[in-house]
Image (cartoon, rainbow, N blue to C red):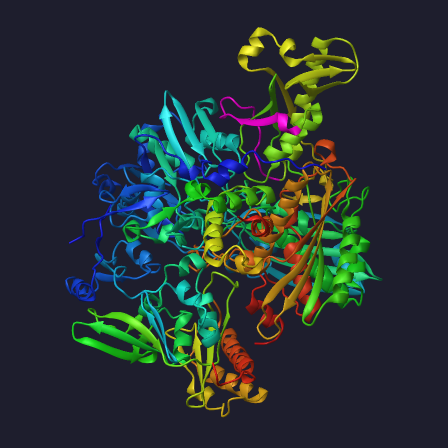
Amino acid sequence: MTEAPGSLRVNGRTVPLENVPTSERLLDTLRWRLGLKGTKEGCRSGDCGACTVLVDGVSMLSCLTLTHEAEGSSLTTIEGISDDPLGRAVQAAFERAGALQCGYCTPGFVVALVGLLRERGTSASVEELLSDLGGNLCRCTGYVAIARAVELVRTEAP
Amino acid sequence: MASLDLVAPASVDAAIAALRTGAPGEVAVLAGGTDLMFDIDRGRGAPKRVVSLRRLPWRTLDWNGPTLTVGSTLPLRALERDPELERRHPGLFQAIRAVGSVQLRHRATLGGNLGRAAPASDLIPVLLSLDAEVDLVGPRGSRSLPVDRFVLGSRRTALAEDELIRSVRIPEPRPSVYLWQRVRPANDISQIAVAAAYSPSDGRWRLSVGGIPPRAVRVPEAEAVLVSPSPTDSEARAAGERAARHLAIVTDRRASEEYRRHLVGTLLERAVRSLATEPKVGR
Amino acid sequence: MTSSPRPDARPKLEGTAVYGVDLEAPGMLWGALVPSPVAHGRLRSVDLAPARALEGVVAVGAAELAHLLPGSTGDPDRPVFPTSTLVYRSQPVAAVAAPTRELARQAAHAVRVDVEPLPVVSDLEEVFPEWPGSSSEGSPHVAAHVRAREGDVEAVFRTAGTVVREIYRTSSVHQVAVEPHACLAEVTEGRWRVRTSTQTPFGVRDDVATLLGVPEESVVVEGTWVGGGFGGKGAALLEPYALLLAKASGRPVKLSLGYREEFLLGRTTLPSVVRMETAVTGGRIVGRRVRLLLDVGTSLPGRDFATGFSIGFLLGPYRTPVFEVEGYAVRTNKPPFGPHRAPFAPQCAFVLESHLDHVAREAGLDPLAFRAAHLWKEGDTTPLGQRVGPFGLSSAFEKARATAARWRAEAGPDTGVGVAVGFWSTGTGAGGEARLRLSPTGLAVVQGEREIGSGSVLAGVASVAARATGLPREWVEVTYEDTSRAPFDSGVFGSRTTGVLGRAVEEAARSLLEELGHRLGGSGPVRLAVESGEVVVERGSVRRSVRELLSDAERTAGGLVANGRHYGKSGTIDERKVEAGTFYPYTDFTGAAHVAEVRVDRATGTVRVTRFGAFHDVGAVIDAATAVAQVEGGVVMGLGTALTEEALWSDDGRLLNPSLLDYRIPTIGEVPPIEVTFLEGFPGAGPFGAKGLGEPPMIPVAAAVALGVRDATGAHVTELPLSSERVARALKLL
């Protein structure tokens, strides 16, 4: 009784869902079917944020989302984040602030921050933004440089 | 890959019908899915059929006079970001902020949280203190239950196999507060939580404690101590002590019984004291 | 002090950097490990048939090894698959591969492992509720025993003014790199090839060769980008299994751990019990006894380094005329103890600093002055008889004290300030070889191991190459090769990369410049420079382009190659003081002094760190941004060890919290402002006098936090982590 599947858009490209098993997670569809490995697999339990993507501009954990649940939505992953000036500004801020070391948590952070800036507006305070990033874990930087990147983005975002 | 029978009915009737076509225990409802994913991953005991509610018109939020009605599939973050919520229901706002992360709250829902009835739910204690009601819909029509008659135990609710939660209604704005104790302040589960609220319409306090299995509970023994809208410090302390004495608490790997008992007393006292000086009317 | 931009930043920011978890090859199978269902048991049989019955599944167990590895013996102490006894839960008993990850998981579940359960030893205090002493002679529960002494500590205790005796307990902590372990293996043309996320490609190569019993040259390891190591991605873990599956199936095999498995299979710091006894007379330490019981899981007897190495951090950095130190590595049914960042040193610093602070208070002495008076200085002798080299710890401590005094004066209610110290030694590993290749377009440092994130390779080693040759940093690049082509290096661990590999790079640079000098003729120092968009060689007023100086053969090969080699040298200890086991001398002495301002909720025991200062004796700063980043990252990781991280084990040897929800590392909201200060001028073993910085920032953190809690409330906590419940108990709230 499974319904006829539709499609979704990823970084502007239409992706049909007909061959995607219903139990498949968005994380796996992105990484293994579409070859978009920039979205990272960390804990697969929703606790680390490394798998964060934007679904209709809203940040979500792709490890806890069934691909078919995103049917009809427009997704942005780290690979598509630079299509947009805000995304590029966040990436540039991370680079200038030295906000990455091993880089594994970085795509999740960048995407989460872009989502937040859209949601709260680029005039949101640094405190507000940092208080909304508790779902992204980093083990290398101690978050200090990441907080600096958040400050930089606020002062320079388009 | 083991394929899942996943359906996303376009109407409430179709959704209810979809629930009835599975064997008991084999059908699960998907709202935000953040808890359900773990059930799906299980080998044995995983649901065979999943009914997604994403097409139903329940992503709603209505302020109707004093009453707030939240559609059961509204993502928590949308409720959190409503410009009126923090002012009118500060305790609920604080409790929502305590759930997981922003990314999680973009999918997790009030309906899902209630339906799962996890003992450590951050939302249930506050809903108890706000006298929230759960609106259910099924083949036999609609019915409503107060939260404490809906949540029956650890992961057990009064929801029938063929019923769905349509909405949650909160009757009136109340001065309220939600305090918790956790290992770390973000992205964590509470060892103990308390939700205090004062009802302007009946002049009585509501004190709930969560985080102790099997489920969050009101503590009438503690409420009985508070006889005015502005309790004194010693009344607040007495309320905390009563709750600490009366509640059934166990030791688990998150915290020992004695520590939880101590926390109940401390946090309840704090919650009451923080509300004691708040204006009680005119929200 | 300079900082260089990181060439790895863009691929990581754009999502194109390939990590172990991302690896893929056409026709690959997914592997999965079959875990032991018990923590201790006699293995009766392993039935792979139910797994093989699934379509496309390949399965290997002990019975297949003779066929897959003809004529090899492997390591008799570390069989790839156990044949008689299972010693920890999740110990791999067999491995399967299947066309999909899901099927591999199902196949692993389908394997029937028949076990006769045996009694489980889960808690080291179960084995030794009291200090073991001579009754433990020959005990199967002891993997290692170390003892050293100087003088008669009992006699000193009898006549001392004050003797303070305490027991401390520390918990198991896990590395928690955000990227789990993963590798992709393929066996072709007699070569065992594996691409893997690792800190130590050559270490993996050697491990695999030993475990499989195949020649080293037949194993080729290529490192990918690493999503965090912290000691957990050193030795081989998944590679042998992936390779065996690849051999058995004739296909590439990908083995990628789920995060639960990451915890269950993790080799890391395990619990400890430490008995500290210190005697003080007239304000001076006159004698100490240290007794360490360290849980080492199923570490093999004779192969444990932890006890002898770590025990040094319970003695130093303090002068002690008379002492007795003894340690037992206790075997329990857990995975073997493995290196975590600054292995066990943060726990030692917590114990030692808390204890000495307590001793001072009991003896009526100022705790900071007391410790300052006993700190090692250059020229002192460590308790084990090694001469202390250039050591900036006293200076760092004084700066920390001054900061603490300022903060204490400004502190609000329920707020206290703690000062703690630690020391470390720039790691050596087995040494390093560096290879430089000079072409008209720049200088390449040819590497085996990857930049794992700290910057020690891309910023540290590359900066050394630039400084040593005179080339601007932007003209130096790092290139990676697999182990069959890259020069040997021990790997990125032990705070050794900039230090030891950096020295090898210095050697290679010296050799390169010498060769160029011969070709140039003349005399005087040779330097590289850039002119008209290409690299030139300068000697006095003579300048020639590299292009002109290369032979045709060199031009074809990509440039002029120079090699350098360095083996870190440790000092020596006085073996007369050693009565049992092995102790370890140091290569250099790196000091760290930390200041933690904490606010304690007196009603709940919750601790929040509100400000932090880190003073590091680094010898020389090679790359400023990298150095600051290491301290920031290490301090926050240390806060996790201090406050929230604890792996919990059940009586039957099960890890109770193998998830990132229940094992809590710090989140962004818990990070205080961190002030970082470097002290240069006390040179260490590395290039330009640099000392390793990867691990020292971890070490004094928990101690500083604990002393801050004591300063704020008087509560004396003798267990790690300082959970709110433990602090509540120490505050006598329960």
Residue B131 location (% of width, % of height) = 37, 81
Image quadrant occupied by the N terminus of chain C: top right
Asked whether residue C128 is in view, the answer is: no
Q: Is residue A158 magenta?
A: no
- The single residue placed furthest to the right in the displayed view is C282
Image quadrant occupied by the C terminus of chain C: bottom right
- C32 vs C302, nearest the viewer: C32
- C254 vs C112, nearest the viewer: C254
- The single residue placed furthest to the bottom in the displayed view is B227
Residue C627 location (% of width, % of height) = 66, 42
Q: Is residue C492 magenta?
A: yes
Asked whether residue C624 is in view, the answer is: yes
Q: Is A57 placed left or right of A128 in the picture?
A: left
- C153 vs C634, nearest the viewer: C634
Magenta-drawn stretch, dominant element (helix, strand or loop): loop
Place residue C473 in its image quadrant: top right
Magenta residues, as a range?
Answer: C473-494
Place residue C419 in its image quadrant: bottom right
Residue at image position (20%, 40%) is C53
Residue C486 location (% of width, % of height) = 53, 24
Residue at image position (64%, 38%) is C427
Q: Is C175 placed left or right of C695 in the picture?
A: left
- The single residue placed furthest to the top in the displayed view is C552
Residue B12 location (% of width, % of height) = 21, 66
- C465 vs C663, nearest the viewer: C465
Q: Is C366 placed left or right of A71 in the picture?
A: right
